[in-house]
Image (spheres, grey):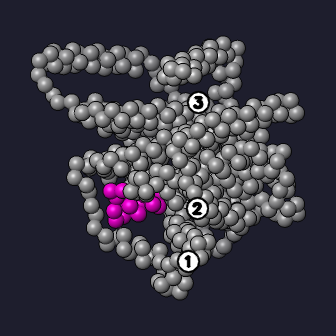
Amino acid sequence: MLEAILFYAFGGLALASAVGVIAQKNPILSALSLIVTLCSLSAIFGLLGSPFIAALQVIVYAGAIMVLFLFVLMLLNVPRQEEGDGPRGMLKAVAILLGLLFVVQVGAVVAAHEHAAAPAGYEATTESVAQLLFSARFLYVFEATSVLILAALVGAVALAKKDL
Amino acid sequence: MTPVMQELLIAVVKVAVLINVLLGVFSGMTYLERRVLAFMQFRLGPNRTGPFGLLQPIADGIKLFFKEEAMPEGASRWAFVAAPIVSIATAFTAIAVIPYGPPVRIPSFEFLPEWLRGREVSMQVADLNVGLLFIFAITALGVYGIVMAGWAANNKYSLLGGLRSSAQMFSYELSLGLSWVGIIMLAGSFKVADIVNSQAGGFWNWNACPGRQFFAFIVYLIAGTAEVSRTPFDLPEGETELVAGFHTEYSSMKFALMQMAEYINMITVAVLVSNLFLGGWHSGVPGIGPSFFWFVGKVAAMLFFFVWLRGTLPRFRYDQLMHFGWKVLIPVAAVNVLATATWVTLVR
């Protein structure tokens, strides 16, 4: 009962702020709406019994990545986009069509799966996530991703600094 | 009453108590900080309102309550109003998962309902499996209060202050997070209560001691001070350059909320230092049992330490701050993590 209330509250908030991301004319307010969406998603992860993923969602996406987004937007001070005519009419039609297609796809996926309840008392703890990540199945992928990120990091520094 | 309702009721009572205690500590701190700072500088400080000036926080509160509320022209209304709310909400949420003492058993009084008699209650609002990660996540969100405040006011001083604050906060957040990794490895848990209990037995078991996590302690002390923008890291509010930084345009209760959030963040850091590094509610002397009062004493000492720092040190320059954060603190914290990991795998 309580869980259902919380789920619908955060689900609604996530949807409403996701609409806000594209409905805002000011890019900074869009970014702020996106932060609200990410935080609501994190709350839903928490309700699903995986507090670790919930915390990571906030730390990585809502915390680290969105702060950089906001930083760039604030420093560039992007002017308000005025709505013009021209090709926008056709873009709108395409957008509506793609949106409808997306809704149909999501509906098909939801309809195709049975709504099995999560096993009672199941919790994706830090330990279980770590066990899975460092198991033989995912270890190489995980390590390869780390190397990739490290390479990107070094590359970014090398590009930004002309003389080291 | 159903068990869920019982839990909820207990949680609501805890939240109410915690918020009121924190507000009390906040107003006490504003008085003590001004008074102690004044004594350090051979002044008297506020001593006119009530005996020893003790009613000064109340007078300040009344003044701020009746002050005119100003919204700058060209401000983004929505973000301007939301910024203090985000700041204060994240400040209170972060401190909710920290325990303040060993669990207490409610005495079996006659007037209490059946389910409450003899029930064991933990001294924290929520006991999360991912306690420290949660605190880290919420503090990361706290930056948005400052960013929004700086941007929304449509004032260049506010914007620069907001940018400085957020750059400083996420530069030092890295070393702050790294300094926790060592103690998490030693305790084998993200739960703050488990970390406190891993330091039982005597003060040589405290994480602050050499041989435990001494370097992490130093790194956290510095990064924590920078995280809450206290001297010598109070550049965001460097009044000689930036008026009052991100809260330049705030007045009345919105200003009070911003101020409150800053103090509560400072209390959070003090509470975390005493819990993670100074043994929390353990006395440090073998034979003397754990108690809530040890914890209070350690937090009070930490709060005094912050005031003391403010009375002693000058402010960093911005490039020194960035240099120190990225090129000194983070390497030290990273080496500490490596050393602790090696020790844990080889010795244990």
Residue at x 47%, y 46% (from the top left corner)? B165
Give the letter of the chain under mark 1. Answer: B
Question: Which kind of residue does numbered mark 3 sit on?
Answer: Pro
B259 falls in the magenta region: yes
- Whether pointer 3 and pointer 1 mark residues with C-beta atoms closer than 8 Å, the reply is no
Quickly name the residue at label 3. A119
List x then y, in percent, for residue B221.
66, 50
Residue at x 65%, y 40% (from the top left corner)? B329
Quickly name the residue at label 1. B43
Give the letter of the chain under mark 2. Answer: B
Find residue B327 and report its image quarter: top right
Q: CA distance from mark 2 to mark 3?
A: 53 Å
Quickly name the residue at label 2. B310
Q: CA distance from mark 1 to mark 2?
A: 15 Å
Question: Which kind of residue does numbered mark 1 sit on?
Answer: Arg
Have a look at marks 1 and 2 and say if they share a chain. Answer: yes
Give the letter of the chain under mark 3. Answer: A
Q: Secondary structure at mark 3?
A: loop
Q: Nearer the viewer, residue A1 or A152?
A: A152
List x then y, in percent, for residue A70.
39, 35
Specify whether residue A111 is in view: no
- Whether pointer 2 and pointer 3 mark residues with C-beta atoms closer than 8 Å, the reply is no
Question: Which kind of residue does numbered mark 2 sit on?
Answer: Arg
Mark 2, other Cα within 10 Å: few <14 / some 14–19 / many ≥20: some
Q: Which mark is residue B182?
A: none
